[in-house]
Amino acid sequence: MTRCVRHTAVFCLLLLLAPLVNAARIQALKADEYDDNPANRRRTIARYSQPRGDILVGGVPVTGSTDTGQRLRYERTYREGPLYAPVTGYASQSYGASLLEHAEDAVLTGTDPRLALLPLWDDLTRARQPGGAVATTIDPALQRAAFAVLGRRKGAVAALDPGTGRILALVSTPSYDPGRLSGNGAAVTRAWQRLTADPDRPMLNRALGRTYPPGSTFNVVTAAAALEHGTAADADARTGTPNPYHLPGTRLMVRDRPRECAHASLRRALAVSCDSVFAALGVRTGPAAMVATAERFGFNEPGPAVPSPVATSTFDRRTPPGRLALSAIGHAGVAATPLQMAMVAAAVAGGGNVPRPHLVDRLTDGDGATVAVTPHAVAHQPISRRTAAELRRMMVGAVTDGTAGPAAVPGATVGGTTGTARDGTRRGARDGARDGGTPYAWFIGWAQKEGAPLPAVAMAAVVEAPAADRETDGATEAARVAGPVLRAAVRGTRP
């Protein structure tokens, strides 16, 4: 009898232990699997059970949260949503998140371990800290200036501090209101469908996520390669380049409208945008030097996370001389984001260094205590200080007596250059015009207030399908877009 009782007791104990072991197995080994199961709504409910942390511009929140009283309780709100959409992105209960809302999601939702005093304890108890804040580097005055001047145009502006890499403005137009995507109802679905079907692609971040042929603004890189490798030792010497210039190995000619481009010096060629000079200069400099210089500026490597992802800018590594000539003037396999071309301008303005661009200045916890600061760092050093100084003088000449004149700012030294390009085209044999495709107008440059020790800003602006009929007028339009941004930067500079 005692034996039977003992066996029964052991069996009952096993029956008791089995569910306990299974529960422990689920908690310890299967927790992530169950958490990630699409049928499990607990994580989603917890995610929206408290207000989301804010994104700050100039120390002021440009985001917020509203209590809906629904099961997914808090929805994201945006102040001046279209103005800051290229910075914040969207945070949607239906469609996820993008840009900073995605890159810093753990901080904003309170799940980042840096926000917790005892991270391991929070993991065990599944506690959630209040959402932290993301303080951006954006200067609201520059952001507003760029957004206002672009207006109804399709285009983008990227501006940064050439000394630190702080992104001061990031604008893409047309834009959209990310607040229309925050919830999960039928109105959000309709807004998503309307935005994603819009042929103008308002949700595309043109400053970070799209590459364009940079046209003549790439002449700065070609000039840098020629100066660094001794192809053009004297920027004021005649180059001996005819106008038109015959592309080697082809029947095509590059013909510039300004008659003064024939045999023009490097300095004058940059001022009035003589593509014939830079096409010939690229061929003389050679493929190895051209590729190496472009890559030192940041081409052909993954775009820098700022922390939002940035598209890769490219320079064609293929070496036939005729194609190299076109690549040297920003066509034929050359494509760049506005941020990348702003980095080119920053290298010239900053004495030869390309700063690592960043959009987040610091992260704070729910009480405002700093948990992380983005350090300033150099991403590349593509050119020497001597070459940078020469390029600065050349770019100043393009503003004072060249195509970039509309970017001039009273009381400041401004350097810049303009360019035009078209998608998927080649240079024509008759007059050098680009055949077919959407035209793009570019400006890249920088501004330094009189008496200030360093330039205040380096920037790039691109306008898709500029209103002007002629390409030279289109480039002027891009310089006009740049002017208010440069003025806003100079006004904010303290000598």
Image (spheres, rainbow, N blue to C red):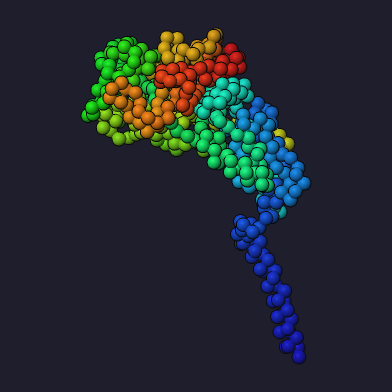
Is 238 above or below relative to 425? above
Instruction: Give 259 or 326, whichever is nearer the viewer.
Output: 259
Q: Is residue 258 visible?
A: yes
Q: Which residue is drawn at 62% across and 44% down?
A: 190
Q: Which residue lies furthest to the bottom in this view?
A: 1
Q: Where residue 491 sits: x, y (%)?
A: 60, 14
Is 30 above or below relative to 82? below
Q: Which residue is drawn at 69% across and 37% down?
A: 77
Q: Which residue lies furthest to the right in this view?
A: 69
Q: Please state if 363 lies on the left or on the right of 289 as rendered.
A: right
Q: Which residue is drawn at 70% across and 76% down?
A: 15
Q: Is residue 416 visible?
A: no
Q: Where residue 304 sits: x, y (%)?
A: 49, 35
Instruction: Give 492 or 152, whichever is nearer the viewer.
Output: 152
Q: Where residue 157 sits: x, y (%)?
A: 52, 26
Residue 324 occupies quadrant = top left
Is 350 above or below relative to 309? above
Instruction: Give 166 or 415, whichever is nearer the viewer.
Output: 415
Quadrant into which the N terminus falls: bottom right
